[in-house]
Image (cartoon, rainbow, N blue to C red):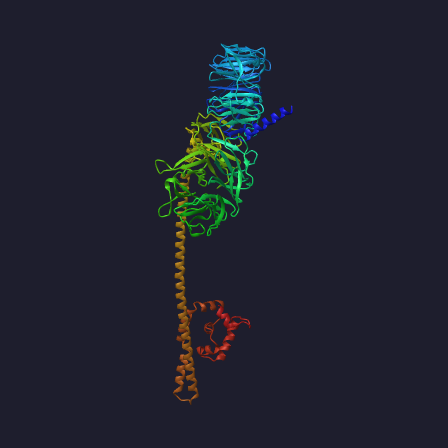
Amino acid sequence: MLAYRNVLVFLFFTVFNLVISQELPPIQNFTTEDYVAENQNWSISQGDDQYIYVANNLGLLEYNGAKWQLYESPNKTVLRSIETVGNRIYTGGYMEFGYWERNNLGSLEYTSLSQKVDVNLVEDEQFWNIIALDGWILFQSLNRIYIVNSSDLSVKTIDSETELSKMIIADDVYFQKKGIGLFRIVNGKAEIVSDDSILKSNTIVNAFRLDDIFLIQTQERGFFILNAEGLQPWDIPANEVLLKTSVFSSLKLKNDSFAIGTISEGIILMTPEGEISYTINQVNGLINNTVLSIYQDKDQNIWLGLDNGISFIDLTSPYHIYKDVSGKLGTVYASLAINGTLYLGTNQGLFYRKRNSVDEFKMINGTNGQVWALSHIDGKLFCGHNKGTMIIENYNVTTTIIDAIGTWGFKRIPNTSHLILQGNFNGLNVLEKNNGTWTYRNKIEGIDISSRFFEFANNKLYVNHELKGLYELKIDSNYQYVEDIARIDGIYNGVGSNALKYNGELIYVSSEGVFKQYENKKFKIDTMFSALFKPFKRLTTMMNVNGEDNLVWRYADNNIAFISYGDMSEKPNIELFPVSSSITNVVSGFENVTKIDSDEYLVGGYNGYLLINDKIPAPKKEFDMVINSIEAHEIDQPKDRLDPAIEETFSNKKNNISFDYSFANYGEIIENQYQYQLLGLSDNWSDWSANPSHKFENLPFGTYTFNVRGKAGNTVTKNIASYTFTIKRPLLLSNLAIALYILSAVIILLIIHYYYRKYYRNQQQKVIEKSKRELEVRELENAQKLMALRNEQLQQDIDNKNRELAISTMSLIKKNEFLNSIKDELKNTEPTKGLNPVIKIIDKNLNNTDDWKFFEEAFNNADKDFLKKVKAKHSSLTPNDLKLCAYLRLNLSSKEIAPLLNISPKSVEVKRYRLRKKMNLPHESSLTNYILEI
């Protein structure tokens, strides 16, 4: 018993090592969260539309390369089997079988055959298998086989007294009656093939034709050969594993190899010679170990229906993947293949294993830590390590050089065999070989920058620092110090730049292009080389392929681009290997590729590596772009699904349109990408995107054409799928509305014109009236000015009259004063006869009435109607009183008035007193003021 257990343990670890160490074809897994259905998937098929269809516990699953779609089974039960024939998808489940066809809206609709054929089903019958053959559809349950004519639905049945196993097609249609033997169907009837005891007691999983051999596969006991001599085991190397494994499903592939689905060990891929190629299970790729169904699609890749999920294995891919599921390796920064051994330098250390071994990678003791570079020099493996430089022989570290830490890389110094230049964190250092041993010699003085990229050319050394630039160094002949250093100007430096040898010439590569050094030592852009990368948006650092001097590479978008010089022309050759973004998602600037075989390249990754075999051509495929569904809706309203073949016209509010589109290409290494265009909105194509749908919201009215195309890697779909639709004008912008708008506008314009003219006339009238008023005002102003002038003239006349009155008055006063003075003088002289006549003449002149008349006229001119007013107010005044009033009006004093009246001043005061009395003036009132106020 103990020995038996040890054997099991040995077999377990053998299989486990085989599993975890394999470099496997790409595997894509779909979980229940991806396809949104139940976990078990019992059968898989592919239609003429290249879509994948799966019989799931919940119903029919459809996968178009972009999205999964679930169609629940008609009676809400499990679907067990599926087979596509033309545009029909036949399915079988619990107490039901029939077919699905696509309607005009792109959805699948179910038609039941079990309800149409003239036969009653067995109670609780389930249909586990379907085969299409020559216009007949065979539905097999555990109790019976129904042979249905797809044209007239006539039906034949083959009953069994025992349980039926899986129906098989291998030239003929075979099936097993458990406990009885193997049968085949001939002319609609069962005919026994073999009743060997092995076939009676063991469940038959499948039967195959391999050349001239008829193979029968059992669930527990492996393969048997059935011939005229009877049944005998098929003696193959895989029996060591198969006889310990319970098989549930199997398939002979188109290359005659076998895919064997087990209950607990995943899938086993076996060659026609019976040797196991791969064992893939939950440890190294699948999401479940129980394989319920296997299907090979039209591109010869494998689909697995699992007990929990669905897996896709890309067998035709030129890629193989090694996944470090344990996390032991870490990120691969460098690799090298030497004498059949593969070395991996990672952030965990240096690992190795034999190239064709199934062993795990082993770490070389003492190398734990960051490995930057690996080089094969002088028959030894040089390891650039974070700790310094390590030299490896026979999988052991023989020398560790820690004089300069952080070794980026190695190059032999030209024309020497005993010197190696290495780039380090602190600059450049020299290793020397003495007595067969490599030792540290010296640091080159004069350069202290980190020197990851360096290259010899034109008897100079060029060192590129991504952030500081490219430097040209002249080093002394003994490589002790830098004689001259110059920074190269005129070229872009930055992340992604590098200086390297290409076709024997020095080139400098940056994001701006490829620069080549010419005879004058100047760098100029190489337009031919740079043009290779114009179509790409994302470019990583261009580097040499480790192990291949004449090949450089870089990531160009989602492609690995290998560049080699042309044999027949100077134009470089570029070969693209498309990969998904998950592969290119590595540490920027530390991408690495190594040639490990004549036609195989290793690409380092963050959890393992990718192998590319450039001798395996990628399958040439043509893809048809299809618009799967179109939905239109108003905001916050249910969506209406549309027929992609019919152009629709939508109301203005129904202006939210969504499109789902796809093309049938499967796998995750090469991503499906899509690009759309909406003519009528923009002529530009969108950027490439992995999203297989797009929604346009709130589109304005107009006619649109939606175009969509796709690409897988660099292969563009052969067609552009299109859909034309129209969004109506809103009611307010309809033709009738526009006509009404125009009519209304005309009416409004006429009304505006009418009121404008009326307004204009009113304004004109107002302007006229205003002008008239202004004219009248001007006339009035002119009249006022004229009146003012006249008044001014009158005032001047008055002033003149007043001056004349004043002058005449003063003249009279002077004259009378003069006459009085003469008279007084004459009176004072001795009287004589001759004086009296003279005195009389003087008195006559003093009382001359002409003087008064002259004064009165002048006074009336100066103060018109004054005397009349005084006479009117005081009628009792005498002429002499009026004279006195006139003199008082002139504001003359009594002394001045006296000569005018030819009386004494005292007499004037008497006259004033009498005048006051006549005028009845109060005593306190001033006579002069009163007269002045009249």
| Residue reaching furthest to the right | 1
Where does residue 29 sit, x and y in percent of width and height?
53, 29
Where does residue 320 sit, x and y in percent of width and height?
49, 31
Q: How many marks?
A: 0
* Frontmost residue, 707 versus 134: 134
* Frontmost residue, 496 versus 92: 496
* Frontmost residue, 689 versus 385: 385
Where does residue 775 sit, x and y in percent of width and height?
39, 54
Question: Which quadrant would the N terminus be assigned to in this image?
Answer: top right
Which residue lies at the image location 47% right of the left edge and 37% below the top edge? 593
| Residue reaching furthest to the bottom | 830
Give above or below for 471 relative to 69. Answer: below
* Frontmost residue, 762 versus 102: 102
Give above or below for 626 relative to 796. Answer: above
Residue 792 in sight in this render: yes
Where does residue 862 sit, x and y in percent of width and height?
42, 69
Which residue lies at the image location 44% right of the left edge and 88% below the top edge? 828
Residue 696 in sight in this render: no
Give above or below for 923 relative to 446. Answer: below
